[in-house]
Image: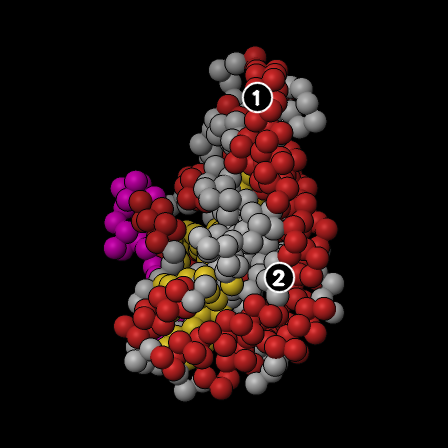
Amino acid sequence: MRSLEEARALDAADPLAPWRAHFALPRTAGGSPLNYLCGHSLGLMPLAARTLVDEELTRWADQAVAGHEHGPRPWIPYHENLAAPLAALTGAQADEVVAMNSLTVNLHLMLASFYRPTAQRRAILIEAGAFSSDRHAVASQIAWRGLDPRQELIELAPAPGADLIDEAQIEALLQREGERIALVLWPAVQFRTGQAFDVARIVRAAQAAGCAAGLDLAHSIGNLPMQLHDIGADFAVWCSYKYLNAGPGAIGGCFIHRRHSQAQSPLHHAGSLPGARLAGWWGHEESTRFLMEPQFRAARGAAAWQISNPPILSAAPLIASLQEFSGAGMGRLRAKSQALTAHLEELLQPLAAQVRSITPAQGAPSEAARRGCQLSLRLTAGSQRGRQVFEALLASGVVCDWRAPDIIRVAPVPLYNRFEDVWQFVQVLTRVLRSTP
């Protein structure tokens, strides 16, 4: 097994090591540092977030309504501060992304535009075991249109005995049943298994079958490099409280490919899209918004899907976090992420008889893209002991995540986690396994 000295040497050589000091590191009630490996669930607070929120509180106190139009970041166009860095993280054009609402609200807005069932095409394809909020949204959208989710919601499961879904399974299903599918909604990273998908391949297959293609980026934005514009996804949605570190309940985001905000933009099977949106006043063009005219004039690009003005106190921490991403660079973050999970994978090898990762292994270079920061671990002794081990880890100062029925999710995040954190996790896990019956 690699040593603590080796881990510390890797940290000393890490060009991203200084970024750890930019985040608030949680501690126990007694002041001892926690080993925080839960950024896939809630990212740590950028220290600059407090400053930016305080600035907006001060502006509110000092200027009140005038803050909408005055100051270094006026509130009316506040979302524009987020467009360029979000576009950089998602591989989009700046007018294709907008920070707004929460993930599920944005998903409903996108389904209102892109799920357009016809007599022939009614179904939506998702993965079996999708995040429950996604499934609830999709099922309710089907029912809202007077259709039966039991018939029109297709959930693709892994092959018998497997934990993961292969992209070839998706392609095969679309070849068999694509003519009845209106929309494919797929995660870039599956939240339970940590599997990263070849979303370009999935988008191609969906659109070749005549389906709209949407992506859930909740566990991939800030985790993996993406190229949404180039792969031609119709839309994508995400939250900002996981890898984007914008705080609990933070403002979410949305991508709409540029072709859908242009006049006479066709969907693959359902005609012109521009009129098919749920409109609100903040989606109205800015220059005439406050004339309060009855006619809706869409803003340019993804901004036209906005419903309401942005929550400033929720958006300010995201500005702070995106500044950290801009400084660190997604390329360097991805390289460190791969190194951290490879280190974790290697350290876990002596425990292979008791702990199995269901996340794709590092393996050959061609396999490196099949996971992000997260490894999902399953104890071979079963779910009851798995839960006991998870609770013992937490009692020992290790913060990871439990997903029923039997998975411990561990995520060393490259912005603030170290190789030493990974080493310490495995030491505690080894000790816990020995002491937990």
The reply to whether dot 2 and dot 1 touch (C-beta < 8 Å) is no
Please state which of residues 105 and 209 is positioned toward the viewer in this rendering.
105
Q: Position of residue 380 (x, y in %)?
A: 35, 81
| In this picture, residue 94 sits left or right of residue 346 | right
Report the Cα–Cα distance between label 2 and label 1: 35 Å
Q: Nearer the viewer, residue 106 or 213?
A: 106
Question: As shown in the figure, which amino acid type bears the numbered disc 2?
Answer: Pro
Q: Is residue 136 visible?
A: yes
Percent position of residue 150, x then y: 25, 55
Q: Residue at x 60, y 47 (%)?
A: 46
Label at residue 422:
none
Asked if residue 406 shows in the view, the reply is no
User: Farthest residue toward the front?
Assistant: 30
Q: Residue drawn at (64%, 74%), measured in percent from left and top?
A: 7
Pointer 2 or 1: first along the chain:
1
* 153 within the magenta span: yes
Report the magenta residues as a range.
141-162
Query: Is 283 placed above or below 155 here?
Result: above
Task: Report the amino acid beneath label 1.
Answer: Trp
Q: Mark 1, residues whose alpha carbon is within 10 Å: few (<14), some, or many (≥20)? A: some
Residue highlighted by disc 2: 414
In this rendering, the answer to whether 328 lies above or below 11 is: above
Quarter occupied by the N terminus: bottom right
Residue 18 at what x, y percent from top left?
70, 57
Where disc 2 sits, the SS reads: loop
Judged left or right of residue 166, residue 204 is right
Identify the disc placed on residue 60: 1
- Within 10 Å of disc 2 (Cα), the crowding (few <14, some 14-19, many 20+) is many
Give the residue at x 44% y 75%: 429
Q: Secondary structure at mark 1?
A: helix
